[in-house]
Structure formats: C-alpha cells, structure tokens
Amino acid sequence: MPDAAEEFIEIMGRHFEEEGTARIAGRLCGLLILTDEPASLDELADRLRVSKGSISLNARLLENAGIAERVTRPGDRRDFYRIAPDMSTRFLERQIERIRVLDGRMTAARERMEPLSDTVRQRLDRAVAFNGAAARSLGRMLEELREERR
C-alpha cells in the first residue's frame, strides 16, 4: 500500500481515538474507504496487521454506526465488509436517533424526579432544548444530503 494510503489510515485511527473510539476502528474505516471491493475479516486483519478478533469487533462497531456494511458472497460462508455506500446519511440517521433517545430518557427522568429545584429544572430544560435543536439541525442536513443524491 502506498505511503499516502498508510498515512491516511493512521490519520483516521488517530481521529477516531481523539473522538473516544478505538483507534483500530478508525484505521479500519480508513482502509475500507480506500478499498474498492468488499474484504473478508482475514484480508482486513492482514492489511492492518492486527488480529482477526479485533477486526471483527471493530467491523461490527462500524456497522452499528452505519459506516460499514457487511455483505456476503454466494457459496462463501465468510462475512465481507465495505464502506457503506450511504455512510453519511446512515451515520446522521443514527446520530439523530441517539439524540432522540437521550432526550426521551432525560424527559422521563425529569418527570419522575419532580419536584426539582429551579436550578436543576432549568439545567434539564436547557439540555432537552439543545437536544431538540441538534436533532432538527441534523435532520435538515440529512434532507440536504438526500436531495443532493436524487
């Protein structure tokens, strides 16, 4: 693999690590972005020089985040991974859902904890308002991405 590709893979690893995710997940994401065809766990482990178990765990993490996609091939029992073709929209959809889940949990907890001090009530109200604004903003961004692809 060319030096620039290796550098990109490592940059992605460091970026993911800075965001609180495993470095290997970022390296795997970087590799999948640069890989034309779906690759098996063995191939990915070999290319990144890490264990197959680590690749399997992090591939599922990327799959759950909407970044990677698991595919199969007829007659082959192995799983293959590729970067999700709609990675951006899937990622945004999942982020919006996570915000809504958090918002619902905070709202339910607030109701169960009444009465609250004014300070705590305001704090929770601001958090719920922020979550709503973030979900709406990301929703608009998602619609723009969908429009661009049509």
Image: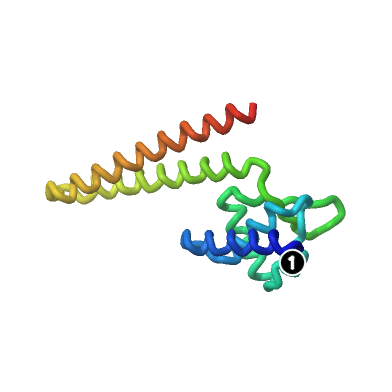
Rendered position, 104 above or below 54:
above
* Figure disc tally: 1
Query: Residue at horizontal 56%, vertical 66%?
Result: 23
Quarter placement of the N terminus: bottom right
Where is residue 107? Give x, y as percent: 29, 44
Colouring method of the image: rainbow
Amino acid carrying mark 1 in the image: Arg
Query: Residue at horizontal 52%, vertical 34%?
Result: 142
Quarter placement of the C terminus: top right
Rendered position, 141 above or below 107:
above
The local crowd at label 1, few if under 14, some if 14 to 19, many if 20 or more residues have their Cα within 10 Å, is: few
Rendered position, 88 above or below 73:
above
Q: Nearer the viewer, residue 145 or 125?
A: 145
Looking at the image, residue 123 sits to the left or right of residue 50; the answer is left
Where is residue 28? Give x, y as percent: 65, 61
On the image, which quarter does residue 100 sit in? top left
Q: Could you say whether the residue bearing mark 1 is in a helix, strand or loop?
A: helix
Where is residue 57? Give x, y as percent: 62, 65
Q: Nearer the viewer, residue 3 or 72?
A: 3
Where is residue 88? Give x, y as percent: 58, 42
Report the residue marked by disc 1. Answer: 47
Q: Nearer the viewer, residue 12 or 84?
A: 12
Q: Nearer the viewer, residue 19 or 67?
A: 19
